[in-house]
Amino acid sequence: MENSKITPKEITQDIDTGLNVASFDYYSGVIEARSRNLKQSMNIEKDTFIVCCGDVMFIVTSKEYPEIQRRVF
């Protein structure tokens, strides 16, 4: 998948699972989530996005947005 012109504010990576979650500001995140045909949910799962504290978050692959350093926790 090619990177869109909308870039996340940050990406966090779970050290145990390797899961990468990108955080976008609300309006940019909604646009990006719609372009990926994601559905809003209360849980981060494949093909979903969540809204939390004014940010839109969803799972990305480790190959997406390689220019953004992951915050590993």
Image (spheres, helix red, strand yellow):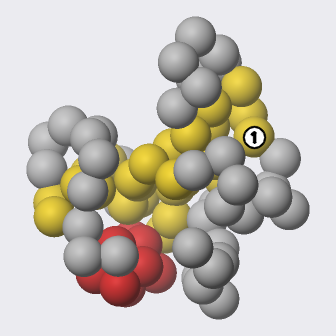
Residue 14 in the figure: left or right of residue 30: right
Residue 14: percent from left, percent from top: 58, 22
Q: Residue at x 72, y 63 (%)?
A: 65
Q: Is 1 rendered above or below residue 17?
A: below
Residue 16: percent from left, percent from top: 58, 11
Q: Which residue in the structure is indicated by mark 1?
A: 70
For label 1, count other residues whose C-alpha is less than 10 Å away and answer few (under 14), some (14-19) or many (20+).
Answer: some
Kindly tell me whether residue 43 is visible in this rendering.
Answer: yes
Q: Is 40 rendered above or below residue 35?
A: above
Q: Amino acid at mark 1?
A: Arg
Q: Residue at x 70, y 55 (%)?
A: 63
Residue 61: percent from left, percent from top: 57, 50
Residue in the foreground of this view, choosing between 53 and 23: 23
- Residue 36: name its quadrant: bottom left
Quarter placement of the N terminus: bottom right
Residue 42 in the figure: left or right of residue 1: left
- Residue 13: name its quadrant: top right
Q: Residue at x 75, y 40 (%)?
A: 70
Residue in the foreground of this view, choosing between 5 and 25: 5
Quarter placement of the C terminus: top right
Q: Circle 1 — which element?
A: strand
Q: Is 31 rendered above or below residue 66?
A: below
Q: Is 37 rendered above or below residue 23?
A: below
